[in-house]
């Protein structure tokens, strides 16, 4: 006669926290990877890096809160010290791309048409002047 033991390993795990944490870390990794790839894309697509960065920030905050509840302080500290600044930089970069969309678009077009290094340097100088002029126009100077 076989007795039913509740400690058998054939049943579902009694603690679903590690599985949830793995899914959360996997989702965070995918969101950060998508943000990085979108940041490398040309301008209209690169604006979506802010959206994926925001998703990553939300997932990171959830992961930090769960890590603190589970007393995994090292994971929470790494998330706060490395993850939060990284996601905020991604979001800030996308926000700046939105704010300076006109000059940044001109810079990308100029760089794609530039054949020599001297032409690329000229593109950068023209873009810098264009941004200063653009910001001056916004401020009424």
Image (cartoon, rainbow, N blue to C red):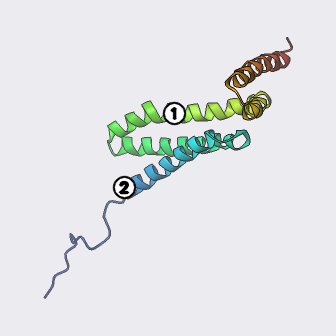
Instruction: Give the camera-side residue of 99 and 125.
Output: 125
What label sits on residue 86 in the rendered view?
Answer: 1
Residue 31 to residue 120: above or below: below
Q: Position of residue 113 (x, y in %)?
A: 76, 34
Q: Is residue 102 left or right of residue 54?
A: right
- Quadrant of the frame with the C terminus: top right
Q: Badge 1: few (under 14), some or many (20 or more) residues near its Cα, within 10 Å? A: some
Q: Secondary structure at mark 2?
A: helix
What label sits on residue 17 in the rendered view?
Answer: 2
Which numbered disc flags the more N-terminal residue, 2 or 1?
A: 2
Image point (45%, 52%), residue name: 26
Image point (57%, 31%), residue name: 89
| Quarter of image, res 39 | top right
Q: Secondary structure at mark 1?
A: helix
Residue 56 to residue 113: above or below: below
Instruction: Give the camera-side residue of 60 and 47.
Output: 47
Q: Position of residue 116 (x, y in %)?
A: 70, 27
């Amino acid at each position: 006669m076989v007795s039913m033991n509740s400690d058998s390993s054939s049943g579902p795990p009694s603690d679903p926290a590690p599985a949830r944490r793995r899914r959360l870390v996997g989702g965070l990794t995918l969101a950060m990877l998508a943000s990085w790839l979108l940041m490398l894309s040309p301008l209209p697509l690169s604006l979506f890096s802010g959206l994926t960065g925001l998703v990553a920030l939300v997932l990171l905050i959830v992961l930090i809160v769960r890590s603190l509840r589970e007393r995994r302080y090292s994971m929470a500290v790494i998330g706060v010290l490395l993850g939060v600044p990284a996601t905020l930089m991604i979001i800030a970069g996308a926000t700046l791309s939105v704010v300076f969309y006109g000059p940044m678009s001109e810079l990308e077009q100029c760089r794609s048409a530039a054949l020599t290094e001297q032409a690329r340097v000229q593109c950068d100088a023209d873009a810098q002047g264009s941004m200063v002029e653009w910001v001056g126009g916004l401020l009424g100077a």
